[in-house]
Image (cartoon, coloured by chain):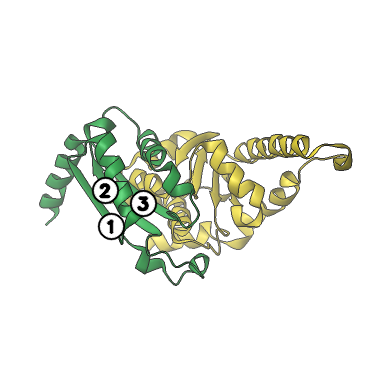
């Protein structure tokens, strides 16, 4: 019961839509005059560009999830499970950003190299890599995730936080 | 005869050799995901695996480090065309497994 309330709150389209405009522009690679560059140089520049864009994405909110699809319509069961856990935990939508790797091939491949992690979803908290779906779920189950999120102050406050505690029991 | 489960064999062999697991359960869940959109046109019967590993090698390693260790062993299988599409992992030390079993027994 509580769980559903919290999920629907976190998954409310308006809460997450703010992050979307960030996705496209920041991943547009900065190549001022590509015709003057050799193919190899271009590729390198792109790779630096992607790295910088990912740096920026990782730092764009305290809690960042790279996923397949969007929080409202995940395109993969593992991404869905991860977003549900963050919703159950009561992560404050204002402190959260999601990036859809399916929208950007550079991001999709780049994030794997960036994190040295071959699968998606990937969760970052305070710019620190936490893990993929299995880790998110196991940390959710053993209480570690609640502890970290609490410490970082990224949960929805007051009445909502009380709901969060109840559903833990 | 060529193996019908080359990827599973490879997972088993690499994990067994490197991690000397006391428990190694490999579940091929590919059939559960065969109808998903990204699997359209994929003929491989070995796309989705769920692997449970108990090993001393995980001692004093955080979950992410444990998963990275397994991913690095299966780097080629994950990267290759028609290779592993999804890999679910549960990584435990023998103590953690014993604790988990005790909890499960209690819950029953």
Secondary structure beneath dot 2 equals: strand
| Chain B tint in image | green
Q: Chain of mark 1?
A: B
For the residues bearing labels 1 and 2, Cβ distance under 8 angstroms = yes
Secondary structure beneath dot 1 equals: strand
Q: Residue A68: percent from the left, percent from the top?
A: 55, 57
Label 1 to label 3: alpha-carbon separation: 9 Å
Q: Chain of mark 3?
A: B
Residue drawn where x is 56% and y is 63% of the image: A72
Q: What numbered label is drawn on residue B27?
A: 1
Q: Earlier in the sequence, mark 2 or mark 3?
A: 2
Q: Residue A16: percent from the left, percent from the top?
A: 61, 55
For the residues bearing labels 2 and 3, Cβ distance under 8 angstroms = no
| Chain A tint in image | yellow
Give the vertical position of A99 relative to A63 (above or below).
Answer: below
Q: Are marks 1 and 2 on the same chain?
A: yes
Q: What numbered label is drawn on residue B39?
A: none
Q: Are marks 2 and 3 on the same chain?
A: yes
Question: For mark 3, what is the residue?
Answer: B88
Question: For mark 2, what is the residue?
Answer: B52
Give the vertical position of A22 relative to B47 (above or below).
Answer: above
* Figure disc tally: 3
Label 1 to label 2: alpha-carbon separation: 8 Å
């Amino acid at each position: 019961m509580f769980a559903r309330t919290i999920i629907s709150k976190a998954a409310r389209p308006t809460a997450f839509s703010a992050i979307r405009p960030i996705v496209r522009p920041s991943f547009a690679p900065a190549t001022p005059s590509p015709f003057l560059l050799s193919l190899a140089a271009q590729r390198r520049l792109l790779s630096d560009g992607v790295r910088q864009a990912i740096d920026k994405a990782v730092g764009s909110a305290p809690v960042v999830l790279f996923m397949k699809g969007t929080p409202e319509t995940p395109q993969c069961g593992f991404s869905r499970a991860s977003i549900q856990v963050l919703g159950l935990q009561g992560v404050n939508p204002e402190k959260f950003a999601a990036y859809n790797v399916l929208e950007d091939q550079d991001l999709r491949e780049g994030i794997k190299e960036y994190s040295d992690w071959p699968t998606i979803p990937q969760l970052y908290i305070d710019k620190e890599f936490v893990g993929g779906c299995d880790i998110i779920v196991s940390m959710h189950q053993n209480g570690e995730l609640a502890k970290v999120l609490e410490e970082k102050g990224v949960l929805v406050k007051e009445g909502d936080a009380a709901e969060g505690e109840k559903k833990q029991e | 005869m060529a193996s019908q489960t080359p990827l599973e064999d490879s997972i088993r062999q690499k994990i067994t050799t490197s991690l000397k697991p006391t428990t190694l359960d490999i579940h091929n869940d590919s059939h559960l995901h065969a109808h998903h959109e990204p699997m359209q046109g994929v003929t491989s019967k070995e796309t989705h695996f769920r692997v449970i590993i108990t090993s001393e090698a995980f001692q004093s390693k955080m979950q992410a480090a444990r998963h990275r260790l397994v991913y690095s062993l299966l780097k080629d299988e994950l990267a290759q065309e028609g290779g592993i599409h999804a890999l679910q992992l549960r990584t435990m030390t023998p103590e953690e497994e014993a604790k988990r079993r005790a909890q499960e027994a209690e819950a029953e």
